[in-house]
Image (spheres, grey):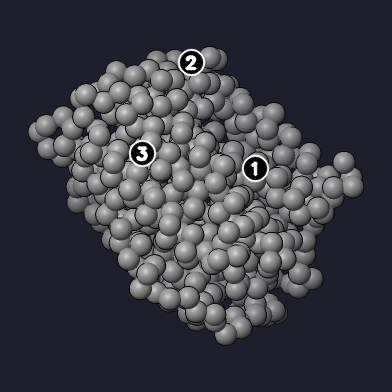
Amino acid sequence: MTKLRGNPWAVLATLSLGFFMTLLDMTIVNIAIPDVMRSLHASLDQTMWMISGYTLVLAALVVTAARLGDMKGQRTLFLVGITLFTLASAACGLATGPSMLIAARVLQGLGAALLTPQTMAMIVAIFPAERRGTALGIWGSVAGVATLSGPTLGGLVVSAAGWRWVFFINIPIGLLVLVLTLLWVPDLRTGRAHRLDVTGVLLSTAALTVFTFAVMEGDRYAWNAGIWCAAAAGIALGAMFLRHQARRQDAEPLVPFGLFTDRGFTVMTALMGAIGAALVGAIVPLGLFLQQHLGFSAVHAGLTLAPSPLISLMVSPFAGRLSDRVGGRRVLLAGLLAFTTGLTAATLLTNDGAHALTFTLPLMLMGLGTGCMIAPLSTEALRHVPAQLAGAAAGITNTVRQLGSVLGAAATTALMTVGSASLTGIHLAMALPVALLAVAALALTMTGSQRPAVLPQASSSRP
């Protein structure tokens, strides 16, 4: 086992397994909501905060966690995050009431936020540029598969063992990741001192927390004045954060503006947000249609959706390798077109005469598209980012992806309530990601690749 210490592929497997757990827990618990409500005598609002609490903390703290990784070492933060996530999973499974479950989910979100940006940063540091596309392709496939497979795995676990095992299953996996990290993952350090921008941390955390809360809770409170005020406050705090960062560009900011001189990083980061929103907007209404309109059980609905993550898992590593050979933009464009075609077909086939096999081919196309989208996104975003800025870049890209998912979920929820006919809202919700991906494909074709000048180096901290 010790011979594998520092082996790039062993490190990648370890990091990807930890990353998979955190993303899976964003969607796998959705299928357990009815069982949780019955078991803990929880209201729907309380149960929904089981999901929202996790997402809120994860979205708000990723940027800060990325900087902490630069300061304390990415391996150290990854270990702390895995430990906290595993302990919080045990607390979730042992919860005796809704309040305890919500608190444990918040701690889970904190653990996920601590470890998530470290995975990308360590992959960039340990893999040479010529093999980074394949590595990030595999890592990217984890993101796509975890997001899409949640309903399938959740349905199987809840049906076989009960909702508590949705959380208990994380314990052996977390312990395995912990041991493998200690054995295989080297402690990569730059040898330079760092300072934490406390004001920036407070402003970014407040801005992301308030804005994310407003978006997640908007539909529940019918987008009343309080929600709009919260959203405006979040945007104002975000503007204050950016102004503060502009003043600290020579003193280790949380967001180095020099990253955005790379057109590839800027375009791909924006696409991460759009694709994150599209993935949520595609799967949620289709899963709801299968259960509510066709009367499928959770397991049956999950298995019906299974072709998409399975195809994505098989395609992503090859898509990453192909990105290195022919260019990530071409692979990404092919993925956008495949996913959009599959989702358009699924939308047109969503009617009362549908059955499980109706969606097999569209879902396979969507899986092909996901595999071809996720892999080159990270590769192209980080292709020219130097290792010393990888932590900051990882924090930015992961935050944008999380915000995209939150906005996509909010828009999907709102659209599903539109219209008097039973399927109108579902069709509108599924049309949204089609439009998003069409715009993304158009933007990709209009923005040519550009190799930037050397990005600015992170300056040493001031006394």
For marks 3 and 1, give the CA distance.
30 Å
Q: Tell me the element at label 1.
A: helix
Work out whether residue 323 can be spotted. Answer: yes
Horizontal side of residue 148 vs 174, given as left or right: left
Q: Residue at x 72, y 66 (%)?
A: 128
In front of the other: 175 or 64: 175
Q: Which mark is residue 375?
A: none
Percent position of residue 332, x then y: 46, 59
Q: Residue at x 56, y 62 (%)?
A: 323
The crowding category of the residue bearing disc 3, from other C-alpha atoms within 10 Å (few below 14, some 14 to 19, many at least 20), is many
Q: Is residue 305 above or below residue 52?
A: above
Q: Which kind of residue does numbered mark 3 sit on?
A: Pro
State the image quarter where residue 430 is shown.
top left
Horizontal side of residue 138 vs 48, given as left or right: right
Q: Which mark is residue 159?
A: 2
Q: Residue at x 70, y 50 (%)?
A: 12
For marks 1 and 2, give the CA distance.
25 Å
Residue underneath mark 1: 18
Residue underneath mark 3: 362
Q: Tell me the element at label 3.
A: helix
Residue at the outermost left position: 420
Work out whether residue 391 can be spotted. Answer: no
The crowding category of the residue bearing disc 2, from other C-alpha atoms within 10 Å (few below 14, some 14 to 19, many at least 20), is some
